[in-house]
Amino acid sequence: MDKNLDKACEKIAENVRDNLEIAKKDILEKIEELNAGFNKLVDHCERMKGQLKEAHEKLGYISHNIKARSMQ
């Protein structure tokens, strides 16, 4: 009886380990997908930040030109 119980416990432990490995693999794949998505978002934000900075500078030039012309 103890041998049967040991075999059953061993089989259960093996199944648990296998399921954990499968779950671990799936979780790591999801993490990689999330990281890739976050990296794309960060890149997009950096580009937008650069474009906004450039637009701010251009608007500053336009504002300066308007003020200069209105003073003439």
Image (cartoon, rainbow, N blue to C red):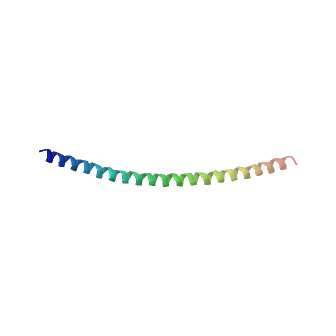
Instruction: Pick the residue in front: 22 or 67.
Output: 22
For residue 3, side relative to residue 62 (left or right): left
For this orientation, the residue located farthest to the front is: 3
Task: Please give left or right for residue 36 compared with residue 6 in the image.
Answer: right
The residue sitting at 22% across, 49% down in the picture is 10
Residue 44 in the image, given as x and y percentages of width and height: 57, 54
**Residue under the point 69% across and 53% down:** 54
- Given residues 29 and 64, the one toward you in this image is 29
Residue lying furthest left: 1
| Residue at image point 46% right, 52% down | 34
Q: Nearer the viewer, residue 54 or 12?
A: 12
Q: Residue furthest right?
A: 72
Which residue is at 29% across, 50% downward? 17
Instruction: Work out which quarter of the rendered image holds the N terminus and state it.
Output: top left
Please count the marks in the image: 0
Q: Report x, y in % for residue 8.
A: 18, 48
- The spot of residue 42 in percent (x, y) is 56, 51
- Is 19 positioned to the left or the right of 70 in the image? left
Q: Position of residue 39 (x, y in %)?
A: 53, 53
Residue 70 relative to residue 38: left or right = right
Q: Nearer the viewer, residue 1 or 30?
A: 1
